[in-house]
Image: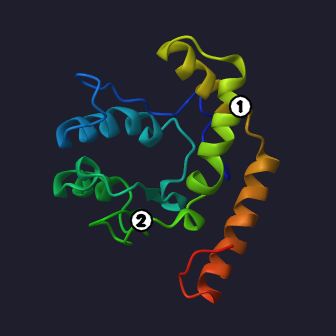
Protein backbone atom coordinates (compact mmCIF):
# COMPACT_ATOMS: atom_id res chain seq x y z
CA UNK A 1 0.00 0.00 0.00
CA UNK A 2 1.55 3.29 -1.09
CA UNK A 3 -0.67 5.75 0.70
CA UNK A 4 -1.64 6.34 4.30
CA UNK A 5 -4.93 4.83 5.44
CA UNK A 6 -8.08 6.84 4.91
CA UNK A 7 -8.96 9.17 7.77
CA UNK A 8 -12.09 7.09 8.36
CA UNK A 9 -9.82 4.19 9.30
CA UNK A 10 -7.19 6.11 11.25
CA UNK A 11 -7.13 9.60 12.70
CA UNK A 12 -7.27 12.38 13.35
CA UNK A 13 -6.77 11.69 17.03
CA UNK A 14 -8.63 14.11 19.31
CA UNK A 15 -7.76 14.27 22.97
CA UNK A 16 -10.02 15.36 25.79
CA UNK A 17 -8.97 18.25 27.99
CA UNK A 18 -9.52 18.67 31.69
CA UNK A 19 -10.67 21.90 33.31
CA UNK A 20 -10.41 23.56 29.88
CA UNK A 21 -6.62 23.31 30.02
CA UNK A 22 -4.83 22.02 26.95
CA UNK A 23 -2.73 19.26 28.45
CA UNK A 24 -2.30 15.53 28.38
CA UNK A 25 -0.56 13.35 30.87
CA UNK A 26 2.17 10.98 29.79
CA UNK A 27 -0.08 8.00 30.53
CA UNK A 28 -2.96 9.41 28.50
CA UNK A 29 -0.66 10.08 25.53
CA UNK A 30 0.55 6.48 25.67
CA UNK A 31 -3.03 5.24 26.08
CA UNK A 32 -4.32 7.35 23.16
CA UNK A 33 -1.48 6.15 20.93
CA UNK A 34 -1.92 2.53 21.95
CA UNK A 35 -5.66 2.59 21.28
CA UNK A 36 -5.40 4.41 17.96
CA UNK A 37 -2.36 2.59 16.59
CA UNK A 38 -3.86 -0.84 17.26
CA UNK A 39 -5.95 -0.60 14.07
CA UNK A 40 -2.90 0.56 12.12
CA UNK A 41 -0.85 -2.38 13.34
CA UNK A 42 -3.54 -5.04 12.87
CA UNK A 43 -2.76 -7.82 10.41
CA UNK A 44 -5.90 -7.05 8.37
CA UNK A 45 -4.58 -3.58 7.61
CA UNK A 46 -2.34 -3.30 4.56
CA UNK A 47 -0.16 -0.51 5.99
CA UNK A 48 3.56 -1.18 5.72
CA UNK A 49 4.82 0.23 9.02
CA UNK A 50 8.39 0.01 7.76
CA UNK A 51 7.60 2.96 5.47
CA UNK A 52 5.95 5.16 8.10
CA UNK A 53 7.76 7.72 10.23
CA UNK A 54 6.16 9.21 13.33
CA UNK A 55 6.66 12.93 14.02
CA UNK A 56 5.38 15.02 16.90
CA UNK A 57 6.20 18.28 18.61
CA UNK A 58 8.18 18.65 21.81
CA UNK A 59 5.29 18.95 24.28
CA UNK A 60 6.34 17.47 27.61
CA UNK A 61 3.65 14.75 27.68
CA UNK A 62 4.66 13.70 24.17
CA UNK A 63 8.35 13.45 24.95
CA UNK A 64 8.36 11.66 28.29
CA UNK A 65 10.68 8.67 28.14
CA UNK A 66 7.79 6.20 28.51
CA UNK A 67 5.90 7.83 25.59
CA UNK A 68 8.98 7.81 23.34
CA UNK A 69 9.83 4.21 24.30
CA UNK A 70 6.28 3.15 23.40
CA UNK A 71 6.44 4.91 20.01
CA UNK A 72 9.83 3.36 19.28
CA UNK A 73 8.32 -0.12 19.65
CA UNK A 74 5.89 0.72 16.83
CA UNK A 75 8.21 2.87 14.69
CA UNK A 76 11.73 1.59 15.50
CA UNK A 77 14.36 4.07 14.36
CA UNK A 78 11.65 6.31 12.84
CA UNK A 79 10.46 8.61 15.63
CA UNK A 80 11.05 12.31 14.99
CA UNK A 81 10.68 14.01 18.36
CA UNK A 82 12.57 15.40 21.31
CA UNK A 83 14.29 12.31 22.79
CA UNK A 84 13.34 10.39 19.62
CA UNK A 85 15.55 8.77 17.00
CA UNK A 86 15.72 12.00 15.00
CA UNK A 87 15.54 15.30 16.91
CA UNK A 88 12.40 17.34 16.27
CA UNK A 89 13.28 20.69 14.66
CA UNK A 90 11.73 23.21 17.07
CA UNK A 91 10.29 26.43 15.66
CA UNK A 92 10.93 25.24 12.12
CA UNK A 93 7.66 25.53 10.18
CA UNK A 94 9.36 24.79 6.85
CA UNK A 95 10.36 21.30 7.92
CA UNK A 96 6.92 19.88 8.70
CA UNK A 97 4.06 19.60 6.17
CA UNK A 98 1.55 19.81 9.00
CA UNK A 99 2.94 23.24 9.96
CA UNK A 100 3.41 24.78 6.52
CA UNK A 101 0.28 23.28 4.95
CA UNK A 102 -2.19 21.20 6.96
CA UNK A 103 -3.11 23.45 9.90
CA UNK A 104 -3.68 26.54 7.73
CA UNK A 105 -5.55 24.53 5.09
CA UNK A 106 -7.84 22.99 7.71
CA UNK A 107 -8.55 26.39 9.29
CA UNK A 108 -9.61 27.78 5.92
CA UNK A 109 -11.86 24.82 5.12
CA UNK A 110 -13.26 23.96 8.55
CA UNK A 111 -14.45 27.42 9.56
CA UNK A 112 -16.42 28.00 6.32
CA UNK A 113 -19.37 26.14 7.88
CA UNK A 114 -18.94 27.94 11.24
CA UNK A 115 -19.04 24.93 13.58
CA UNK A 116 -21.28 25.69 16.59
CA UNK A 117 -19.74 23.25 19.04
CA UNK A 118 -16.78 20.91 19.54
CA UNK A 119 -18.55 17.93 17.98
CA UNK A 120 -19.31 19.85 14.77
CA UNK A 121 -15.72 21.11 14.70
CA UNK A 122 -14.36 17.55 14.99
CA UNK A 123 -16.74 16.30 12.28
CA UNK A 124 -15.68 19.13 9.99
CA UNK A 125 -11.99 18.38 10.57
CA UNK A 126 -12.53 14.68 9.83
CA UNK A 127 -14.51 15.48 6.68
CA UNK A 128 -11.89 17.90 5.35
CA UNK A 129 -9.01 15.49 5.99
CA UNK A 130 -10.83 12.76 4.04
CA UNK A 131 -11.30 15.23 1.18
CA UNK A 132 -7.56 15.91 0.78
CA UNK A 133 -6.76 14.33 -2.58
CA UNK A 134 -3.76 12.20 -3.47
CA UNK A 135 -2.75 14.92 -5.96
CA UNK A 136 -2.75 17.54 -3.22
CA UNK A 137 -0.62 15.30 -0.99
CA UNK A 138 1.85 14.82 -3.86
CA UNK A 139 2.07 18.60 -4.39
CA UNK A 140 2.59 19.24 -0.68
CA UNK A 141 5.32 16.60 -0.51
CA UNK A 142 7.02 18.09 -3.60
CA UNK A 143 6.89 21.48 -1.91
CA UNK A 144 8.24 19.85 1.26
CA UNK A 145 11.29 18.60 -0.62
CA UNK A 146 11.85 22.09 -2.08
CA UNK A 147 11.56 23.66 1.38
CA UNK A 148 14.06 21.21 2.85
CA UNK A 149 16.54 21.99 0.07
CA UNK A 150 16.06 25.73 0.73
CA UNK A 151 16.56 25.18 4.48
CA UNK A 152 19.84 23.40 3.77
CA UNK A 153 20.96 26.16 1.38
CA UNK A 154 20.08 28.80 4.01
CA UNK A 155 21.85 26.78 6.75
CA UNK A 156 18.65 26.49 8.77
CA UNK A 157 17.70 30.17 8.76
CA UNK A 158 14.08 31.16 8.19
CA UNK A 159 12.95 31.28 4.58
CA UNK A 160 11.38 34.33 2.95
Camera-side mark, 1 or 2: 1
Residues under numbered marks 1 and 2 in contact, where contact means CB atoms less than 8 Å apart: no
Q: Quadrant of the C terminus?
A: bottom right
Q: Residue at x 31, y 59 (%)?
A: 72
Q: Residue at x 25, y 35 (%)?
A: 31
Q: Kindly identify which numbered label has been placed on residue 109.
A: 1
Neighbour class for label 2 at 10 Å: few (<14), some, many (≥20)? many
Expressed as whole percent of the image width and height from the top left, the position of residue 153 reads 64, 88
The residue pinned by badge 2 equals 78
Quarter-wise, where is residue 69 in the image? Answer: bottom left
Q: In the rendered picture of this protein, how many numbered marks are placed on residues? A: 2
Quarter-wise, where is residue 128 in the image? Answer: top right
Direction from residue 23 to residue 122 in the image, left or right: right
Q: Secondary structure at mark 1?
A: helix
Neighbour class for label 1 at 10 Å: few (<14), some, many (≥20)? some
Question: How far apart are the alpha carbons under marks 1 and 2?
Answer: 31 Å
Residue 88 vs 32, above or below: the answer is below
Residue 109 vs 123, above or below: the answer is below
Residue 121 vs 42, above or below: the answer is above
Q: Residue furthest front?
A: 160
Is residue 132 among what the camera can see?
yes
Expressed as whole percent of the image width and height from the top left, the position of residue 27 reads 18, 39
Direction from residue 53 to residue 15 in the image, left or right: left
Expressed as whole percent of the image width and height from the top left, the position of residue 5 reads 60, 40
Amino acid sequence: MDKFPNSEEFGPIFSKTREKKQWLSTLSVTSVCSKNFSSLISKENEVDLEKIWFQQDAATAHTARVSIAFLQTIFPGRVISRHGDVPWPPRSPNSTPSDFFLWGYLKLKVYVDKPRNIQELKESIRREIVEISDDMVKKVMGNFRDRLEQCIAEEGRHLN
